[in-house]
Amino acid sequence: MNPQYLQIPQPTPAMTITSIIGVIALLVVAVFLGIMARGKWKSFDEYLIGRRDIGPWVTGLALTGSAISGWAFCGSTAVVYKVGFAGMWFAGIWTLVGNIPCVWLAATKTREFAAKLGAATVCETVGRRFESKALQTLVAASMLFFLFMYSVGQLKAAGGVWYAVTGLPPFWCLGISIFIAWLFIILGGYMGTQWFIAVKGAFLGFVGALIGVWALIYAGGFGEITKELTAQSPKLMNLIDPTLPKVGMTQLFSSYVGILATPVIFFTMLVGFPHNVSRFLGMKKLSKKEFILLCFVVWLTAGIPVMLDCSSNGLVTRVIFGTNLLANKQWGADLAAPMLSWAIGGSGLLAMYLTGLVGAALGTLSAMVFIMSANVTRDIVKLWRPATSDKSMFYLGYFLIALFLFLPFFWTLKRPPELLAVFMGLAGMGLGAIFFFVNVFSYYWKRATKWGAIFTVVFGTIATMWGGWAVLGRTPPLLGMGTMEWILVGGCAFLYFVGSLLTKPPSEKTISLLFPAKK
Amino acid sequence: MQPELSMFSWYVWGFLIIGTFLGTLIGTWLIVRRWEE
């Protein structure tokens, strides 16, 4: 510990009590929204999709809530705290480059395609758009695999920070939180989940902006931050630091190949993520004014807060704490964001941050778990056994939601996945590369075919698994993550376009339904 | 000796933030211009 900088505080009663109150308030809101939404659905279809009548405010906030995960709210500050400015490329400075195009490209089309095709899930939309049950099953299986990988890391940051800040074991906080998540998902279905994620999105936007602006003022502005960091190590101010990380050739923040890959990663991920695109399934048909409002809501809540969280917050933490947080072997840089909140705003701001972080993890996890459960119930069981009763689907769904919530909880307690950021980055890269083409691009290209989509899904899934080994599992790594992203996106694009051009498109009936001739 | 202070990284960061925000506004305007009610 360097005495020149602030030390990690021991948990005090004030920190513990305010944090508990914050999380309890969050969970009460979650249950309340679940109960409120309970009367809004009557069939399994309505449970999955609502009544396609949700307006731009809730939809926009839900997109923000779904896109800002525990990683964006915690891990991104940690990366910048650890490596300085060079880390911001990986830390999500590009978030808006993905979220706004997600609205532009996917919002109205997802709603329109799903409504025309009578689809309740993204997989069903894809399956019916390409007239292929096999493709729907394949897409559901691939989505399940990726979302599962992605969900495993969701609770880690919240659990770690909870323990570090309150001194209480994460078992009860996370255990009660996932039980509440299960309760509001089964009570409220799509509608309740959408409402919860929207409330969380609004809260995250507010807390994120508050901490970000407060931190900049507290540190004395850009000039003072530069002065302090340069005194610690001039490398912290470098846009690229070739010595980071020590292994790997084209890693995301130490090479130009990697840095050029990051906007592509964020663009394809945020546009292609099924849990983002699904926010539009239950949306109402928007007027021009409502569409502008939707863009504005996302711009406001996912713009400034995330950019500050992903960049200047990490630098200010470094100014305040030096390398003292890294001396904590258990949580290390993950403590950057909560410790920054505590340093600048005391227990009150810390509790708000922690509530936001638990909410961020819970909201994104709920969105994913809801889709994972529908992948099995609607996209596999109901697809191949249409006679299955709604009652059986509900029971199977309730069980799967409990299972998919429990597993990340279990792995968070028993064997926390290492390198949270990098691990989640690879699953996200795979999801983004596949579904950007198979789902969103197919809204616009009527020549796309089921074989183009099948090749893309198969290649993307296998390449991501291989990439996990080549980039993360092997010592030394065979290639950097930057190269891996280009292989994934390039391969998916090639197979999608060439595979489509060489095979037969869907029937004229479907094409004319989805792509009506302009008047 | 004090190392030389460079604000270059902040300029890039500011350019990105302002650029994406302006891009958002312009892109949205371009889309709604062609909107068919």
Image: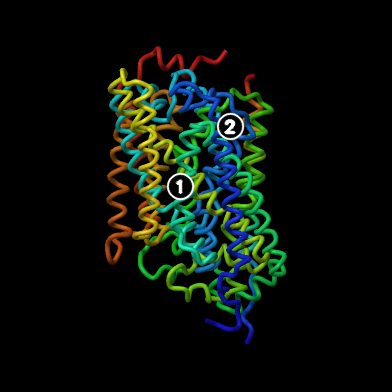
Determine the image quadrant of residue A411.
bottom left
Front in this rendered view, residue A385 or A128: A385
Q: Is residue A247 visible?
A: yes
Please name the residue that numbered disc 2 is placed on: A36
x, y (%) of residue B19? 64, 49
Residue A137: numbered disc: none
The chain ID associated with circle 2 is A
Which residue sits furthest bottom? B1
The chain ID associated with circle 1 is A
Looking at the rendered structure, the kind of residue marked 1 is Ile
Q: Earlier in the sequence, mark 2 or mark 1?
A: 2
Looking at the rendered structure, the kind of residue marked 2 is Met
**What secondary structure is found at the residue carrying circle 2?**
helix
The local crowd at label 1, few if under 14, some if 14 to 19, many if 20 or more residues have their Cα within 10 Å, is many
x, y (%) of residue B28? 64, 35
**What secondary structure is found at the residue carrying circle 1?**
helix
Please name the residue that numbered disc 1 is placed on: A178
Q: Is residue A377 above or below residue A143?
A: above
Q: Is residue A204 left or right of residue A123?
A: right
Write the residue at 30% across / 30% down: A137
Distance Cα–Cα, label 2 vs label 1: 19 Å
